[in-house]
Amino acid sequence: MSAVLLAVHVLAAIVAIGPVCVAASMFPPEARRALGEEPGAAARLPVLARICRTYALVGVAVPVFGLATASSMGVLTEPWVLVSIVLTVAAAGVLAGMVLPRQRALLEGAGPREALVATTGRLAAVTGVFNLLWAVVTVLMIVRPGSSTGV
Amino acid sequence: MPLRLAATVELVSLVVLLANLATVHLDGVAALVGPVHGCAYLVAVALTVARAGWRSRAAALSVVPAVGGWAAAVALERAAGAAG
């Protein structure tokens, strides 16, 4: 059963988190181009935001099946799992509390242009933090420090 | 529509879990359907909050176990019907 749960967990991580990382990273530069009146960029922005929103929702499966896998493997209390849980909660908070609301604010485009340009900078920063958190969790999943089954 | 789907999965998966518990009690069923139920529950809450906000009545309904997703979907549809 652990193998099935782990397969779903890894598949969900690749299919859901990958698109969010890519689309969220592409959003700030596209938003800057759209603010620079580049035709086409404004049309691409809603698609990128939609990918982020939709796959963030699919991404719920990653921690849920991750917890199930860890519980099934009996590793739920190992330090690398606990640290990963904390980082995942932080990443989810950054995505739901900072990345997605700022994307929405830029999509609505209300307010002076300078403020919107500044928002693209802040959005790029928090998106980088989000991606970094996931990169650290992925490395923890592979290296598993403190575990007897690490590579 | 996505909220209705999540709400249905939330309810059906719980019924499957409880039926399994009461009858054959297979560990495999619990291990697989359990996370599916957890996902559906969280997705239903997230969809409701995304549409109506944290402080809405629909959001409060959505966190109710088992039938929360359905209650939130009905509340949101009624609100949309009343507004439209």
Image (cartoon, coloured by chain):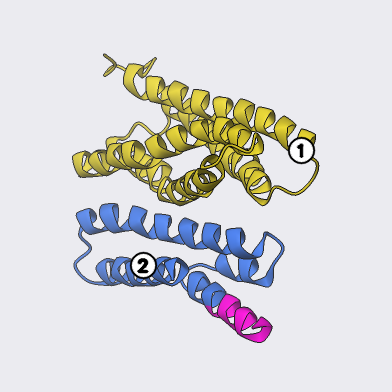
User: Quick check: A144 left or right of B53?
Assistant: left
Give the camera-side residue of A123 and A63.
Answer: A123
Q: Which tint is chain A?
A: yellow
Q: Quadrant of residue A62?
A: top left
- Residue under the point 28% across and 35% down: A73
Boundaries of the magenta span? B74-84
Give the camera-side residue of B60 and A26.
Answer: A26
Most distant residue in the right direction: A112
The C terminus of chain B is located in which quarter? bottom right
- Residue under the point 46% across and 21% down: A136
Amino acid under disc 2: Val
Please tell me whether residue A73 is drawn above or below residue A57 in the rendered image: above
Chain given the colour blue: B
Please tell me whether residue A125 is drawn above or below residue B43 in the rendered image: above
Q: Which residue is mark 1?
A: A113
Amino acid under disc 1: Arg
Q: Which residue is mark 2?
A: B9
Residue B82 magenta: yes
Residue A90 in picture, x, y percent from top left: 58, 34
